Image (spheres, rainbow, N blue to C red):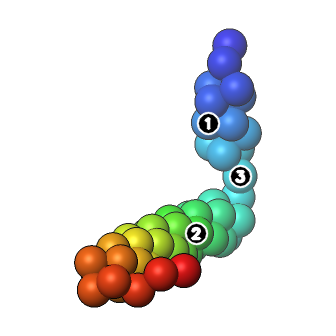
Amino acid sequence: MTALDTIKQQVNQLPTEELYSLKSYLNHAIIQEKIMELQKQQGMQQIRAALKKGYQF
């Protein structure tokens, strides 16, 4: 049994309220991860643009 199988088994045993709470937390964490990735991409684009204009760090 893999760790993922163990987690799935434990999640299936959660009461409904706790399951909804876990889903909400995971959705929030996924959204935060996507926001951070977008901010990182934008930052890299700004650095590249600055370097093209001759700015030195």
Residue under label 1? 8
Distance Cα–Cα, label 2 vs label 3 = 20 Å
Q: Residue 2: in sight, yes or no?
A: yes
Residues 52 and 12: in front is 52
User: What is the crowding at mark 1: few (fewer than 14 residues within 10 Å), some, or many (at least 20)?
Assistant: few
First reached walking from the N terminus: tag 2 or tag 1: 1
Amino acid type, residue under disc 3 in the picture: Leu
Residues under labels 1 and 3: Cα distance? 10 Å
Measured as percent of width and height from the top left, residue 15 is found at 70, 58
Tag of residue 29:
2
Please report the residue visible at 47 percent of the width from the left and 81 percent of the height from the top: 56
> Secondary structure under badge 3?
loop
Amino acid type of the residue tagged 1 in the rendering: Lys
Splitting the image into 4 quarters, where does residue 20 fall? Answer: bottom right
Task: Report how far apart the C-alphas of labels 2 and 1 lie in the structure.
Answer: 18 Å
Q: Pick the quarter of the image with the N terminus.
A: top right
Q: Which residue is disc 3 drawn over?
A: 14
Residues at discs 2 and 1 in contact (Cβ within 8 Å): no
Provide residue 11's location: percent of width, then percent of height: 66, 45
Front: mark 2 or 1? 2
